[in-house]
Amino acid sequence: MATLDKFSRLAALKPTRAIPARPAALRTPDEEDHLSRILGAGINSNRFGEHIVVRNWCSTPEFTEPSAVALDLLARHRDDALSRRTRAALSDPAKWLFLDTETTGLAGGTGTYAFLVGLAWWDAGGLQTEQLLMRDFSEEHSVLHALAEHAAERPVLITFNGKTFDWPLLENRFTMTRRIALPRLAAHLDLLHPARSLWKLRLGSVRLVELERHVLDPTKLGWTREDDVPSSLIPQFYFDYLRGGPPSPLAGVVRHNQMDLRGLGALFGKINAMLSESCEHQDTEGIDLFGLSRFLHRRGEPDRAHATCAQAISAGLPAEFRPQAHRELAAHAKRRGDHAGAAALWRELAADPHDGMQACEQLAIYYERRARDHARALEFAQLGLAKVRRSRTSLRDRLVQARLARLEANFLKRVARLQHRTGLDLSAGTQARLPTYGPRI
């Protein structure tokens, strides 16, 4: 019994939460290591050799509590359910690792090296950055080993275009070492895809630099991209250094990478707020709300997508997007079973020279199948047929011509069927009215 009491007291001394590993001590660079001294860096050693490490703690962006709804939307595709392991890892920000690389080429491939691996994680309300730099290609194994250790502690990766470029490149480098196991990730959130959905309509370009300038608040972030190094020049700067050139240009590359890491953290906070159900979007532009509604629809959230699309229209949209928003709102209403509401929206679009054909087709379907008003359905079918024929004479694109030919054939069949049914309605003594001056839009 005394033995049991002894073990119970020992168990009580164990910490209830895991204590994060302290950063490994860094060696001071040698006098002749001018690059490390310019960067204010230290030298990290492991069993594969050495590499440069640049550590900084940044007060901005500040940590924001992640929304469970936002994380679910970012991690899943449509209605796919997240695994319990993935959901548990995502819910713990201590497991997150922001990653951005600088490489010897922008096209990837087996000959491309990630000579600078930028890492960051939330710490003490701010962002701790750690950048792993190779002084030459012989230090790659050392850098990859350090990256593997970080990913083992924090297996939730957050990147910007990392699923397409950064992580596949690193996977390839791990494979080519034949000595360092590829880290197993619990989840990987790529913020490029939601950013493209949310802001591409307004900005066109969704490069991280553009998002910082036009979506994030540079004043609040407390940094600017003045004198920033263009991404296209970064590989050449590194090659120049390897050939004996001055190390000072690499200081700009390291700063560029750090700005990308901080921008990545700030971007997550913005997307997290946009996707949260508690966000009221009072100060959000209509065009961004429209992008949000399309993202929600693709992620299998039809009700939120419908409400957000309606809010976007109310907030005001540029003229070139208003018909598209009305068309998608009508489609949302139809999917929800609100056929009368969808018809009201299609009637607004029926007179539009570009969207009128689809609107007329949908209205003909509605009045034939739902309202059982064959005469009204015939009006819109004939109007749609006239619009198609006018468009076919003015367009020369073969693909568009083929699509319009199919649409014209469908309208012809529908008109013939509705004329027959309207004749039956008249012979039965109903109050059907044949079209004379076009539909009553």
Image: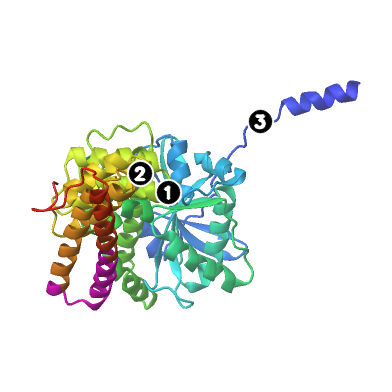
* Above or below: residue 397 compared with residue 134: below
Image location of residue 241, percent across then percent down: 36, 73
Residue at image position (48%, 43%) is 72
Does the magenta run of residues contain 402?
yes
The kind of secondary structure element at disc 3 is loop
Q: Residue 299: which disc? A: 1
The kind of secondary structure element at disc 2 is helix
Quarter location, residue 221: top left
Asked if residue 416 can be seen in this view, the reply is yes
Q: Is residue 57 left or right of residue 287?
A: right
Report the residue marked by disc 3.
Answer: 15
Q: Which residues are magenta?
A: 393-412
- N-terminal-most mark, 2 or 1: 2
Image location of residue 114, percent across then percent down: 45, 67
* Above or below: residue 385 compared with residue 65: below
Q: Is residue 318 left or right of residue 116?
A: left
Nearer-the-camera pick, 147 or 22: 147
Distance from Cα at disc 3 to Cα at disc 2: 34 Å
Q: Residue 6: which disc? A: none
